[in-house]
Image (cartoon, grey):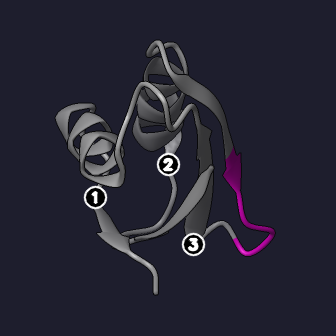
Amino acid sequence: MQIHFRLERPLDEALMAAINDAQAVYGIERIQLSPSLDSLMVEYDASRLRPADIEAILRSKGLPIVPAF
């Protein structure tokens, strides 16, 4: 499954480190930044995680995100 989020502030080294940390979470398969670097797409295992779980994980890692609809 995929879910998209918009970043609330510009990407910097700290946010890149947070993305790397989030990618290490079991059930998250891939996090990809948009070409404009203002949003990201998360591929995840839906049998292990729900969209609310993904959002909570990203926020716990310090990523300033809002769901992109």
Q: Is residue 5 left or right of residue 41?
A: left
Above or below for 36 versus 16? below
Give x and y (percent) for residue 22. 44, 26
In-front residue for pair 22/29: 29
Which one is earlier in the sequence, the residue at label 1 or at label 2? 2
Amino acid on which disc 2 is placed: Asp
Which mark is nearer the camera, 3 or 2? 3
| Highlighted magenta segment, given as a residue range | 32-36
Residue 42 is one of the magenta-drawn residues: no
Quarter-wise, where is residue 37 in the image?
bottom right
The residue that mark 1 highlights is: 64
Q: Which disc is residue 12 wearing?
A: 2
Q: Is residue 35 left or right of residue 21?
A: right
Q: Which element type, helix, strand or loop, lies under badge 2? A: loop
Q: Is residue 44 left or right of residue 9?
A: right
Which mark is nearer the camera, 1 or 2? 1
